[in-house]
């Protein structure tokens, strides 16, 4: 027996107990507040306990990073509790407010979570993109001292139903993936049933096709030893041929049923019958449940036997609920041990009443185990959260003397940065799902090149064939080209946006995507924000302004996505100078990680920082000329400023966001011929305006009567009778709330239905967001008011 195997087995049993006790305590001991089950996935945790014990306590080094499958979070928290990185108070409050989270969370848990998990499949895929980012950093002159580790995913077999995993496999193959392990907990049971027969054969073929090594771990040490006995070959054949559902049912029924079934199928064959009869019922059950993934000795050997950096998939056969009374039952995914079952199991585990939370309960040699735990490499350096210095942001400016679209302005800003030698420009990494050229990243890529671990020649350049895309693949490159899969884009942005914390080297990730297809990657975008990854997402071209492309390429709801997504500040500038101001601010905002109270000027918690979403357009519009005043600059960042200040007798305000600026300005000019003091409110971020407004309202409700949001300040002097017309090339709900700020009647204009092909004028007219439609609605409001005044009140009330 190897020196540490005894300790590994002890740790395995401690983690099994602590995780299951935590779940049991939350469901059956802690006082009930409401009538719903707390839950906790005891069975899904049990199937992972041997794998995680071997991995963390025998194999991993501090530079390695792990995404723990969501339903194994109790094992993870128990492990951190054992190592002193989690508190008993939070363990006792599992799935309660302020307690350890249902699924590992970088931002909500206090223990050392590498990657948040929860939305199944995403935690798996992000490890491959983290590995690509690790290689990217190591290839740079400034990244040589960054730690190199393995990116490991602990995968539930049902997670392999998620399509984004296979998209990630393909992208990994294209980018010469390495230093990535996926460990599949192949317990063959999901929430609704048993996994289909033969799935592992298909999985092996898929991984093999994408260049992964596949290590199948089916039999534990007890089984392998039994196979060496006379008749063991027959037992092995029987185990390998047994259907998943049969194996699960037999496991649940236990040793006596195992014996009957094995003797029925294999009896009277002499040596194999003797092999079975030599074991008591409990020993026979232990043998049959000793699959490879439930054997800490086997898993440690398999992990420690890998001496290369090729991506590796470990297919570890396990029993769901291993080591507990509910092992193998088809309903055990969300099931819990009853109080009676748990009491019997507690006696079986040897844990005395009152010692349930004791770390060393049942440990025969506490001193030896504590010495062992002190020397475990993975935990030796403590919490593995790194930091990197903030990057200075150079001045960003742009020529506004000609017509230009915000998409073109974005490309020009990046191109100007690419010509310089700022440290910020050196840390920018761009990426796009096969739309690099059409989202204006081309000039940046031409100068800063594409990333690959090895130089790759461009046949067009070598043969002097003219092309606007002079794209060279090199380790020095700063653009990572992706296939057309938006989930991969968001996952890569998430991985790159954590680089300062995970690898100790700050990156400034910028990803571009066709704006309507932001929706394709929403789950991964939400996942990246939940982890507090920092990046800039550029959605372009946007709205029905992309008129000739038709409705499938015209975004409607993306402004609402930007408003509703936590951790993401959303902007939709109309003019190039607005974009320049916003991008300069955004480069700084990405790097903030402060605390503190909300800024009383806006009531936004900008010191915490976050990611940024820019919704841009391809339509060149006339620019307003040089603007240097502070009201404009600060207003563009805070979310709005007066493009045309309303007078004291203002009857109409037109508030617009984004590409429809020319229509709003034109309409204001027409209306101003007959109406006094018309105001035009340029909204650059409905998201930030709304967030500041709701935050100020909360502050007032808590006693700070002086709290006033930026939008409230802007609208405070508008007369009560003033009408607000809002207009956007997107869903009208984006701005419709503005009337509630000071109680003004509001008419929201926007796009509520799929568009179609046509000219911009055609579509603006069709959706009622052109200047004529704005004027028409204003006149309609006035007529309605006059009509109401002309009708006598004939109602009588008793």
Image (tube, rainbow, N blue to C red):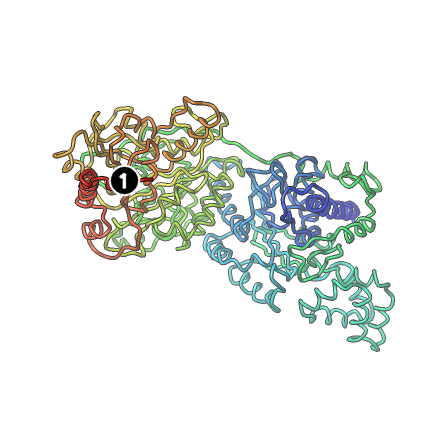
Question: Could you tell me residue 194's position as x and y percent?
Answer: 63, 64
Along the viewing direction, whichever of 176 and 462 lies nearer the viewer: 176
Quarter assignment of residue 791? top left
Report the residue at 32% width, 57% height from top. Answer: 552
Q: Position of residue 306 (x, y in %)?
A: 64, 52
Residue 722 vertical placement versus 59 (above, below): above
Asked where in the image residue 284 lies, by quadrant, the reply is bottom right
Count the numbered circles shown.
1
83 shown above or below 250: above
Q: Quadrant of residue 746?
A: top left
x, y percent for residue 209: 52, 63
* Residue at which label 1 appears: 726
On the picture, is 69 further left or further right than 459? right
Q: Is residue 414 left or right of residue 474?
A: left
Q: Is residue 517 visible?
A: yes
Q: Nearer the viewer, residue 122 or 464?
A: 122
């Amino acid at each position: 027996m190897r020196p540490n195997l005894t300790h590994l087995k002890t740790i395995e049993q401690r983690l099994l107990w602590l995780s299951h006790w935590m779940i049991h305590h939350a469901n059956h001991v802690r006082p009930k507040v409401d009538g719903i089950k707390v839950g906790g996935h005891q069975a899904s945790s049990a199937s992972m306990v041997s794998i995680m014990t071997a991995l963390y306590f025998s194999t991993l080094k501090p530079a390695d990073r792990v995404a723990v499958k969501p339903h194994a979070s109790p094992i993870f928290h128990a492990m951190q509790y054992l190592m002193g990185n989690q508190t008993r108070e939070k363990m006792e409050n599992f799935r309660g407010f302020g307690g350890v989270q249902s699924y590992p969370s970088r931002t909500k848990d206090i223990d050392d979570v590498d990657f948040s998990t929860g939305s199944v499949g995403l935690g798996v895929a992000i490890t491959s993109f983290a590995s690509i980012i690790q290689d990217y950093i190591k290839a740079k002159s400034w990244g040589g001292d960054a730690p190199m580790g393995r990116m490991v995913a602990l995968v539930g077999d049902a997670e392999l139903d998620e399509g984004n995993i296979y998209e990630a496999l393909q992208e990994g193959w294209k980018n010469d993936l390495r230093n990535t392990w996926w460990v599949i907990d192949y317990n063959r049971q999901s929430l609704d049933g048993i996994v289909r027969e033969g799935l592992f054969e298909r999985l092996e073929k898929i991984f093999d096709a994408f260049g992964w090594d596949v290590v199948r771990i089916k039999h534990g040490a007890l089984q392998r030893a039994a196979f060496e006995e006379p008749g063991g070959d027959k037992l092995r054949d029987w185990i390998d041929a047994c259907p998943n559902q049969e194996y699960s049912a037999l496991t649940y029924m236990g040793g006596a049923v195992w014996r009957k079934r094995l003797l029925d199928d294999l009896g009277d064959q002499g040596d194999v019958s003797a092999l079975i009869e030599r074991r008591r019922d409990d020993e026979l059950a232990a043998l049959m449940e000793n699959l490879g993934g439930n054997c800490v000795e086997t898993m440690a050997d398999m992990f420690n036997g890998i001496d290369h950096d090729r991506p590796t998939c470990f297919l570890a056969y396990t029993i769901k609920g291993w080591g507990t009374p509910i092992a193998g039952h088809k309903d055990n995914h969300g099931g819990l041990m009853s109080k009676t079952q748990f009491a019997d199991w507690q006696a079986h585990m040897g844990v005395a009443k009152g010692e349930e939370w004791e770390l060393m309960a049942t440990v025969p040699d506490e001193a030896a185990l504590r010495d062992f735990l002190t020397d475990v490499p993975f935990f030796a350096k403590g919490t593995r959260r790194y930091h990197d210095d903030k990057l200075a942001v150079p001045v960003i400016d742009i020529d506004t003397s000609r017509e230009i679209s915000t998409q073109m302005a974005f490309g020009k800003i990046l191109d100007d940065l690419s010509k310089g030698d700022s440290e910020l420009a050196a840390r920018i990494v761009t990426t796009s799902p096969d739309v690099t050229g059409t989202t204006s990243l081309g000039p940046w890529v031409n100068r800063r090149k594409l990333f690959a671990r090895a130089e790759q020649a461009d046949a067009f350049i070598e043969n002097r064939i003219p092309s606007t895309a002079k794209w060279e693949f090199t380790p020095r490159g700063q653009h990572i080209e992706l296939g057309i899969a938006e989930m991969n884009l968001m996952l890569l942005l998430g991985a790159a946006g954590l680089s300062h914390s995970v690898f100790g080297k700050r990156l400034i990730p910028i990803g571009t995507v066709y704006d309507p297809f932001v929706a394709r990657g929403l789950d991964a975008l939400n996942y990246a924000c939940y982890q507090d990854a920092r990046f800039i997402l550029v959605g372009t071209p946007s709205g029905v302004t992309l008129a000739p492309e038709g409705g499938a390429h015209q975004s409607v709801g993306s402004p609402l996505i930007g408003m509703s997504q936590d951790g993401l500040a959303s902007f939709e500038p109309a003019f190039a100078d607005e974009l320049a101001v916003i991008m300069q601010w955004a480069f700084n905002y990405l790097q903030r990680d402060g605390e503190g109270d909300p800024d009383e000027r806006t009531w936004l918690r900008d010191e915490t920082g976050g990611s940024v979403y820019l919704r841009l357009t391809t339509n060149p519009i006339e620019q307003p000329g040089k603007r240097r005043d502070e009201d404009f600059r600060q207003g563009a960042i805070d979310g709005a400023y007066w493009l045309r200040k309303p007078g004291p007798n203002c009857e109409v305000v037109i508030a617009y966001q984004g590409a429809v600026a020319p229509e709003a300005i034109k309409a204001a000019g027409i209306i101003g011929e007959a109406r006094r003091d018309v105001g035009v409110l340029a909204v650059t971020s409905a998201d930030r305006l709304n967030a500041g407004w709701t935050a100020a309202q909360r502050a007032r409700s808590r006693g700070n009567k002086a709290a006033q949001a930026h939008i409230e300040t802007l609208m405070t002097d508008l007369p009560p009778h003033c009408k607000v017309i809002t207009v956007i090339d997107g869903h009208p709900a984006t701005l419709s709330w503005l009337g509630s700020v000071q109680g003004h009647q509001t008419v929201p204009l926007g796009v509520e239905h799929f568009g179609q092909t046509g000219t911009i004028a055609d579509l603006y007219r069709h959706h009622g967001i052109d200047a004529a439609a704005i004027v028409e609605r204003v006149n309609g409001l006035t007529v309605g008011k006059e009509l109401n005044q002309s009708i006598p009140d004939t109602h009588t009330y008793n």
